[in-house]
Amino acid sequence: MPRVSQDHLEARRRQILDGARACFARHGYEGATVRRLEEATGLSRGAIFHHFRDKESLFLALAEDDALRMAEVVAEQGLVQVMRDLLAGRREDGPDEDGRGEHPADWLGTRLEVSRRLRTDPDFRARWAERSEQLTKATQDRLRRQREAGNLRDDVPVEVLSDFLELVLEGLVSHLAMGLPADDLGPVLDLVEETVRRHRRSS
């Protein structure tokens, strides 16, 4: 029997994550039954759980994958841009430009489910704590670079600014989770961004 290539395994893993992301976003963790996961991924139970031990491991891998992609956006554009992407995802659907199912709308679905499980599942909270550090690290690294470039206020520790931005992110996620109006939140994020900037005094 020929060995399955690493590229094939990675493509199959990506297929499972993309399908599961849509399934969890639509039905929530509890509602994402194995049958629905099969339908969403187009794969059998055996194929799905060949790559992931169980549904919990699949969801954690998915949440970690999304957190990593968020961290990449943070590293390049900042945490406020992640928030803007979440707002954009609230209003749009479909895959991104390269055709993969990684649209911010899918980020939001995963993030909402992560937030819900953090409140209700102590075991998940403990496992997730290990994985959430990458987003915090990416945020703090970018803030330090911005400070070194003279773009960031220097009267507040980077760790405090990072906590502030992450708190705003969680507040935004909660706002969206409650289904409250979000079309007018762009200026609010402008204010958040302005709050962390360094203001140079005019001579």
Image: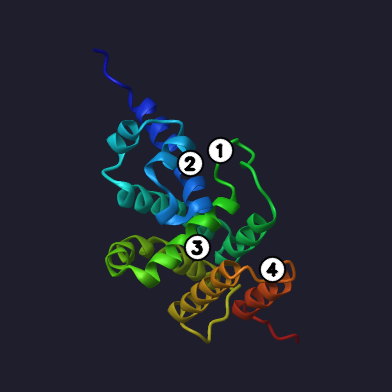
Going by the numbered disc 3, the residue's amino acid type is Leu
CB of mark 4 within 8 Å of CB of mark 3? no
Q: Is residue 168 visible?
A: yes
Towards the viewer: 101 or 119: 119
Circle 1 residue: 100
> Can residue 149 be seen in this snapshot?
no
Query: Residue 138's x, y, as percent?
Result: 45, 62
Query: Marks 4/2: CA distance?
Result: 26 Å
The quadrant holding residue 37 is top left
Mark seen at residue 182: 4
Q: Is residue 18 above or below residue 126?
A: above
Callout 4 amino acid = Ala
Q: Quadrant of the C terminus?
A: bottom right
Q: Residue at x 33, y 63 (%)?
A: 128
Residue 100 position in % (x across, y down):
56, 38
Q: Nearer the viewer, mark 1 or mark 3?
A: 3
Asked which secondary structure carries label 2, the reply is helix
Whichever of labels 4 and 2 marks the residue nearer the N terminus, that label is 2
Residue 112: give its label: 3
Q: CA distance from mark 1 to mark 2?
A: 8 Å
| Pointer 3 or 2: first along the chain | 2
Of 87 and 203, which appears nearest the observer? 87
Q: CA distance from mark 4 to mark 1?
A: 26 Å
Q: Earlier in the sequence, mark 1 or mark 3?
A: 1
